[in-house]
Amino acid sequence: MAFRFRPVDTAFYDLFTESADHLVVGAALLAEMLGESADHADVAQRMRDAEHQADETTHALFRRVNSTFVTPFDREDIYRLGSGLDDVMDMMDEVVDLILLYEVRTLPPDLSQQVEVLQRCAELTSAAMPKLQSPQSLEEYWIEINRLENAGDKNHRRILASLFSGQYKTIEVLKLKDIVEALEGAIDAFESVANTIEQIAVKES
Amino acid sequence: MAFRFRPVDTAFYDLFTESADHLVVGAALLAEMLGESADHADVAQRMRDAEHQADETTHALFRRVNSTFVTPFDREDIYRLGSGLDDVMDMMDEVVDLILLYEVRTLPPDLSQQVEVLQRCAELTSAAMPKLQSPQSLEEYWIEINRLENAGDKNHRRILASLFSGQYKTIEVLKLKDIVEALEGAIDAFESVANTIEQIAVKES
Amino acid sequence: MAFRFRPVDTAFYDLFTESADHLVVGAALLAEMLGESADHADVAQRMRDAEHQADETTHALFRRVNSTFVTPFDREDIYRLGSGLDDVMDMMDEVVDLILLYEVRTLPPDLSQQVEVLQRCAELTSAAMPKLQSPQSLEEYWIEINRLENAGDKNHRRILASLFSGQYKTIEVLKLKDIVEALEGAIDAFESVANTIEQIAVKES
């Protein structure tokens, strides 16, 4: 690796990695929520706990930005990446929360495909964070996340069509649509993180 | 206060304050709209007037950015903060407009709690603007807005659950959900303003 | 024109123009989709092709940002403008896709007004791109886009009110509302492009 002119505070990379690791936990809880015999209230409580831990990591990151003179990349980008990771957690928490809130017991089977996309995004993001020191090396990661987002988008549209195919009561359609859209929002939030990293790589190049 | 190296054009702070003051007016009109005997068409007209005045303040701000050589902080941040304040007004205007448009006469009583959150956000934002010259001094403000947004989010989810509890016809649920979501959008827009100010403070530190 | 201190790679302007030209094609396909005897599957397929071509232009733009040492304006702004133009295409594609997906045969007649707004936005954006070398000269363009967005917003609210006027079944309202909102999203995406250009002009001034 080339000589670096800027001293690097590796704690930032550790915090981004910690933040992404929370997303792996969140995606697993989401998968559990979709299980047939899941205790919705219990899973939702554990999701809330995971979301609080993710918040603490985000705040630790922002405190460090405030107290560090030389940051590994632009302060605003650290802020944006930290917020972006936090947004994913919020969206996954919202999916779980809506399932509990709307008292939905039967979910369309296709939803599990979207959760698989989310789990894959979480793993890739978690694996990418420790390599953030050389952002240009992460091209494969952001291309793959974009590919997953496209696949998720196709699933999403197929699920929407099935909701409107006449097999659900209108009030059920209304509930399920919110859940399905929150799932897609979580996948989009992963893409937004990947785009931020791509932009950081562009700046550094 | 420390010696400043950059001459400061205080007109920017006056315009931000003016912009936030419009939000106090908007939040009050929203509260009036929810009153039992409110004349919806009349309140909506006054809301539209308030929104036009807010627009004019925003444009005065942007014209000043264009014609000023040295700005108190980054041009883009002035632009973002001005747009952010304007977004809040647009969202509050949308709530009022939807109530008129959908001809909704009976609103869930819990909505008034959300409007209280909005009014509190408007007051805090209006009180914060004159102190924007030392953005780091506004930490309490952005923490409190974030707390209010969390409280608003909890209200929002409880209201959503009540909409789906079976007491409303499906077409009513559809209407009320839009209104409830626009209200939450307005609270989120206040949070977004607070986050922008936090980021300005981070940059200046 | 004044002497420029920075050498200019005109390929960027060509790519932005190409990108905006795809939007003119997309808006025309959208208008075709609304025709009474339109073959929905066929138009949707051509829209998908147009969307892929737009993607390729966007990627060519991003590759060039990565491989060019001196860019005509900030890398991040090139990135944002490219993404913004791409977002418009995605939104127009979504409208067409939803009409196909939901198997909607009868659309409210007012929708054609929204598509006219979109077509006008596409033409103006396409005409503006070749003049991007002097962004301050584009003030009329962004003012007109903002005016069109306001007109579109008024249409949008009127269409929403008609959806809830009692002439549609609730499940139809749910479908049409998604389509109507995606249309408005496309208009908003044009406004967002115009705002980005205004911000570039502000920075350059």
Image (cartoon, coloured by chain):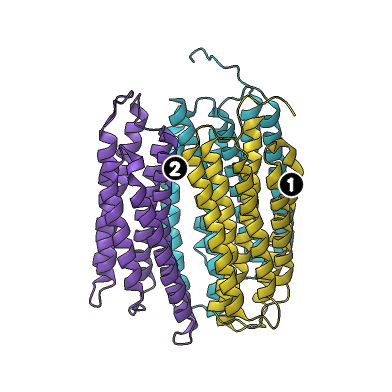
Chain colours: A cyan, B yellow, C purple
Residue for point 45% across, 54% down: A152
**Count of marks, rendered view:** 2
Label 2 sits on residue: C199
Q: Tell me if residue A147 comes above or below residue C98 in the rendering.
A: above
Q: Residue furthest top?
A: A3
Which amino acid type is marked by label 2? Gln
Whole-percent x, y for residue B179 in the image? 60, 71
Residue B158: x and y, percent? 71, 68
Where residue C80 appears, x then y in whole percent? 42, 42
When the figure is inspected, residue A159 is found, relative to residue C86, above or below; the finding is below
Q: Of B87 and C36, which appears nearest the observer?
A: B87
Which mark is drawn over residue C76? none
Residue at 74% in and 52% down: B147
Q: Tell if the residue under mark 2 belongs to the same chain as the one under mark 1.
A: no
Left or right for A113, reference B142:
left
Rendered image: mark on residue B141? 1
**Residue B118 or residue C146, whichever sits in front:** C146
Q: Quadrant of residue B6?
A: top right
Quarter the N terminus of chain B occupies = top right
Specify whether residue B166 is in view: yes
